[in-house]
Image (cartoon, rainbow, N blue to C red):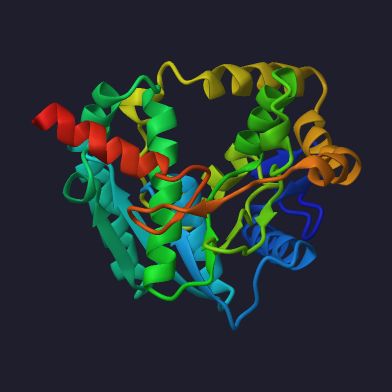
Amino acid sequence: MKCRICGKKPIIYMPQHRLALCREDFISWFERYTERTIKDFRMFTNEDRVLVTVSGGKDSLALWHVLRKLGYNADGFYLHLGIGEYSERSRRKVEEFAERLGAKVIVVDLMEELAGIPELKKATSREACSVCGLVKRYNFNRVAKEYGYNVVATGHNLDDEASSLLANVINWNVKYLGRKYPVLEEEEGFVRKVKPFCKFTEKETALYALLNGIEFVEEECPYSEDASSIFYKETLNRIEEKFPGTKLRFYLEYLRKVYPRFREVEERELQRCKVCGEPSPSEVCPVCRLKERVAERKA
């Protein structure tokens, strides 16, 4: 097998693209493919201010690196989740990488704003991953508006999107399927949210990060061990081994054939939270209700 571009020995073969590439051509292809995804879905332009949510992991740091290299006005945002040494290591990786890029990073400590994930898990019946997702989405949107960014970019990859899609299809979560798209447009109270890595596998983003010398936190979050998403990822990986290209086809065919129908029925009635003013499905938003429970526990 040879690199399709130059004929050298390849370092990766991507069966879903029937493409083998050497180190230099893979990096170049990865960056071009990111740019094409951004343009195809009209995610943002060079005039937009993009806030990249960085966790210290390979996907988010690689995304920040690519966007800066492509010339986009992209800064980082790190939410310290209060998960002991794991969060401290993640914060150090993010701040060191920001210095390397010469870019701005906004750091918010959840323990100062609300409480760490361990304490929030005790204050609610939600699973840790569910609570984490809730406070992340809330703060991503809040901080972006506060600092004047009109786009929030996350490092979700194809494995993330395909496994989430599978879970929502199996459970027929119509509400979520109606919003399962790599671009969620700006609406009242919300900035635009985008996923430029939605077509890359986890293997591809990891390889790009390694080839560019990006130092990232390799261990998974301590609370992710029992996450249902891991099961769905493993299931898709087994299918992918037998039928290469299944993940990408499953995701892209959903966007092309099925999403438009779910989008028609997806409706959200939102109001302003009377406590914080953020968009909310009820009079008091879920995060403010969490704050009340934490205060009650402390009392």
What is the residue that sits farthest to the left in this orientation?
Answer: 299
> Of 12 and 51, which appears nearest the observer?
51
- Specify whether 138 is left or right of 151: left
Residue 200 in view? yes
| Image quadrant occupied by the C terminus | top left
Classify residue 84 by image quadrant.
top left
| Image quadrant occupied by the N terminus | top right
- Specify whether 160 is left or right of 8: left
- Residue 185 position (above or below residue 248): below
Residue 148 placement (x, y as % from top left): 43, 76
Residue 8 placement (x, y as % from top left): 72, 53
Q: Residue at x 10, y 31 (%)?
A: 298
Q: Residue at x 74, y 67 (%)?
A: 42
- Specify whether 65 is left or right of 120: right
Residue 253 placement (x, y as % from top left): 87, 39
- Residue 139 position (above or below residue 252): below
Q: Residue at x 52, y 53 (%)?
A: 271
- Residue 271 position (above or below residue 290): below
